[in-house]
Image (spheres, grey):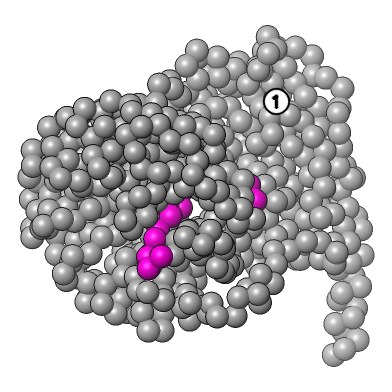
């Protein structure tokens, strides 16, 4: 039997030394960014589609992400309309621009294009591509947890000897927080190359020994016309040539030798968890790894932890041991942080519905349908649920039966964060550049405020505002801390000396506003109607940072998460770091500090953990 096995391996390896595919040509597009204000992106794509259609010999087209500018439903449908003019098959995946600000949480892309991943074979070579985030919240690039699970199933079908080309929007390096999950899998297969976009330029790359090619953006940038790549697959190589639509194809600019590569994992960097050894008092009591991304803050009530995932499932776990108690399936991704009151839990879904479930059983008590995805997080106060959606509406519902008490229809973009109730006013932001104040009793607009930027990406939409002495404090991607009068919406002052992005918090006594900067430090400002400078700054050493993970104070300690799976605790009075715990290598959502010595954390990669400290 041993001799038979050795013979099989020998002949399999011998077969790999000779190409098992036939030559062909395909077109390689990336970063079309449909939704440009001046219409040039649309012109560039139309010109490329027409150019491909007039040529012969192109087998298919691959398009590696950032199809749209902001992932709006309208942009996605327009992109589909333009690409459907192609006379050859095309295979498409989303990028960070399609998912990061998506009003549907990525649901619309999958519905319109049929999927956010693909696998197919042509002339003896298999092609596999999948989505990449971040989804809804800003963070590093990330291959969704459900896509990694899907990869495992598809790679098993393909087998280790089938020639394979992998495609993603991001380069498969540390631009993705879980790059190693992809490379480690691809190295076990006959991977010929990886194709990507994101960088808007043609580049020959290498991903831990796997040949890589980054394709240019289809946008014209400063040139007269846009462009793309033609790829000629030969029996021994894959040749890349840039083409400007309507003109002669340029000389090849790079090539990849198609052969069996001796891949190894030796000598390559992987995330280190050694920091946990320095703080032995912090324990991970349990961890539950979901099969999809978790991009929200879990709720804790009684003996249960509640959260949703990007496959649309809401799970309840035991606080004691992390074992699943029940699940409820919705029809779309759940990015809404659940809220609990009594025996009722409320959350929104990408299927356009708001659900109220019984906490003990997961039984549906009521649902409310809206006209678009509900990615906003509910606030429950005195039997009323306040929640915003992607249908440009904000609603107040009865917790008892879901009856609509009022709705505000003046939004110009989706709501994705949690509102704050202060006195008789509700305060929240939307991805339409504005912060809103509504009368809590009626939903009437009191005021709306913006930071003066015309760029929607600079909206105060991911930050949960904090309020003290009738002053609203907000931070946004414009990197300013803004102080706003709660009664009038008037800007009292703004400060950008600390480059605080979207993470904010407030001390228990209301004396300080905390901010997480984009490089290493936590800063504190005195709360005041008069303009404040940074009062103190603490270097925590977390490096470059940009995820919207709010700062939570309890019992004189401040807790927050970072983009690389770490949770920090600091003592603001002593101005010192207390401990650090690393659970994962992806974004940590705002933590739930539900007792004096316990918190629940959830990461983008779907890890939900209970820490004791």
According to the picture, the residue beneath numbered tag 1 turns out to be 228
Q: Nearer the viewer, residue 187 or 304?
A: 304
The N terminus: image quadrant: bottom right
Answer left or right for 145 relative to 489: right
At a point 55% along the width and 14% down the height, the residue shown is 40
Q: Magenta region: which residues?
A: 542-556
User: Is residue 347 visible in this depiction of the protein?
Assistant: yes
At a point 65% along the width and 44% down the height, the residue shown is 170
Q: Nearer the viewer, residue 240 or 233?
A: 240
Work out whether 325 lies above or below 108: below
At a point 58% along the width and 27% down the height, the residue shown is 32
Badge 1: few (under 14), some or many (20 or more) residues near its Cα, within 10 Å?
many
Q: Nearer the viewer, residue 279 or 52?
A: 279
- Image coordinates for residue 273, horizontal then vertical, percent: 66, 70
Work out whether 146 lies above or below 473: below
Q: Is residue 440 magenta?
A: no
User: Is residue 72 visible in this depiction of the protein?
Assistant: no
Location of residue 583 by image quarter: bottom right
At a point 53% along the width and 77% down the height, the residue shown is 282
- Image coordinates for residue 604, horizontal then vertical, percent: 50, 58
Location of residue 318 by image quarter: bottom left
Toward the top, the furthest residue is 224
- Image coordinates for residue 141, horizontal then vertical, percent: 60, 48
Q: Under tag 1, what secondary structure?
A: strand
Q: Nearer the viewer, residue 127 or 328?
A: 328
Q: Is residue 555 magenta?
A: yes
- Image coordinates for residue 591, horizontal then vertical, percent: 42, 62
Work out whether 498 lies above or below 613: above
Answer left or right for 208 relative to 503: right
Toward the bottom, the furthest residue is 1
Q: Main secondary structure of the magenta part?
A: loop
């Amino acid at each position: 039997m041993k001799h038979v096995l050795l013979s099989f391996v020998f002949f399999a390896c011998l077969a790999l030394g000779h190409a098992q595919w036939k030559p062909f040509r395909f077109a390689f597009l990336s970063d079309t960014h449909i939704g440009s204000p001046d219409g040039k992106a649309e012109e560039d794509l139309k010109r490329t589609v027409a150019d491909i259609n007039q040529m012969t010999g192109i087998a298919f087209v691959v398009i590696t992400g950032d199809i749209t500018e902001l992932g709006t439903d309208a942009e996605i449908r327009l992109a589909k309309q333009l690409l459907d003019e192609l006379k050859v098959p095309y295979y498409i995946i989303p990028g960070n621009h399609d998912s990061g600000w998506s009003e549907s949480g990525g649901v619309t892309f999958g519905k319109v294009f049929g999927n956010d991943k693909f696998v197919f074979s042509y002339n003896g070579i298999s092609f596999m591509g999948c989505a990449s985030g971040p989804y809804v919240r800003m963070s590093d690039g990330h291959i969704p947890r459900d896509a990694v699970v899907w990869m495992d199933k598809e790679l098993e079908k393909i087998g280790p000897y089938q020639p394979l080309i992998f495609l993603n929007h991001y380069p498969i390096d540390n631009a993705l927080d879980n790059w190693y999950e992809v490379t480690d899998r691809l190295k076990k297969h006959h991977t010929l190359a990886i194709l990507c976009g994101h960088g808007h330029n043609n580049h020959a790359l290498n991903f831990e020994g796997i040949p890589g090619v980054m394709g240019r953006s289809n946008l014209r940038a400063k040139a007269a016309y846009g462009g793309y790549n033609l790829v000629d697959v030969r029996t021994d190589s894959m040749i890349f040539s840039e083409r400007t639509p309507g003109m002669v194809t340029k000389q090849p600019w790079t090539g990849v030798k198609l052969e069996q590569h001796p891949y190894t994992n030796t000598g390559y960097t992987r995330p280190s968890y050694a920091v946990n050894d320095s703080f032995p008092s912090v324990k991970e009591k349990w961890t539950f790894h979901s099969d999809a991304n978790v991009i929200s803050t879990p709720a804790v009530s009684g003996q249960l932890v509640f959260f949703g995932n990007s496959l649309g499932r809401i799970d309840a776990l035991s606080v004691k041991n992390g074992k699943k108690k029940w699940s409820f399936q919705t029809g779309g991704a759940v990015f809404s942080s659940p809220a609990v009151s009594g025996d009722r839990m409320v959350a929104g879904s990408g299927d356009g519905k708001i659900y109220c479930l019984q906490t003990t059983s997961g039984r549906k008590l009521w649902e409310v349908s809206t006209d678009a995805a509900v990615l906003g997080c509910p606030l429950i106060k005195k039997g009323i649920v306040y929640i915003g959606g992607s249908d440009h509406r904000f609603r107040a519902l009865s917790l008892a039966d879901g009856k609509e008490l009022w709705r505000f229809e003046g939004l110009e973009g989706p709501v994705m964060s949690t509102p704050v109730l202060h006195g008789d006013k509700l305060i929240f932001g939307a991805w339409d550049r504005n912060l809103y104040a509504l009368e809590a009793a009626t939903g009437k607009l009191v005021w709306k405020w913006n930071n003066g930027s015309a760029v929607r990406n600079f909206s105060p939409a991911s930050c949960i505002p904090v309020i003290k002495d009738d002053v609203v404090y907000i931070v946004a991607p414009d990197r300013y801390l803004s102080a706003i009068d709660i009664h009038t919406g008037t800007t009292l002052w703004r400060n950008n000396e600390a480059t605080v992005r979207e993470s904010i918090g407030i001390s228990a006594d209301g004396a300080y506003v905390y901010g997480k900067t984009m490089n290493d430090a936590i800063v504190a400002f005195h709360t005041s109607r008069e303009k404040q400078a940074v009062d103190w700054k603490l270097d925590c050493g977390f490096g470059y940072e940009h995820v919207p993970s709010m700062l939570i104070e309890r019992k004189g300690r401040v807790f927050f998460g970072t983009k690389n799976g770490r949770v920090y605790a600091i003592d603001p009075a002593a101005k010192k770091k207390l401990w650090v715990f690393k659970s994962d290598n992806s974004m940590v959502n705002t933590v739930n500090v539900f007792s004096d010595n316990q918190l629940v954390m959830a990461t983008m990669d779907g890890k939900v953990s209970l820490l004791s400290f």
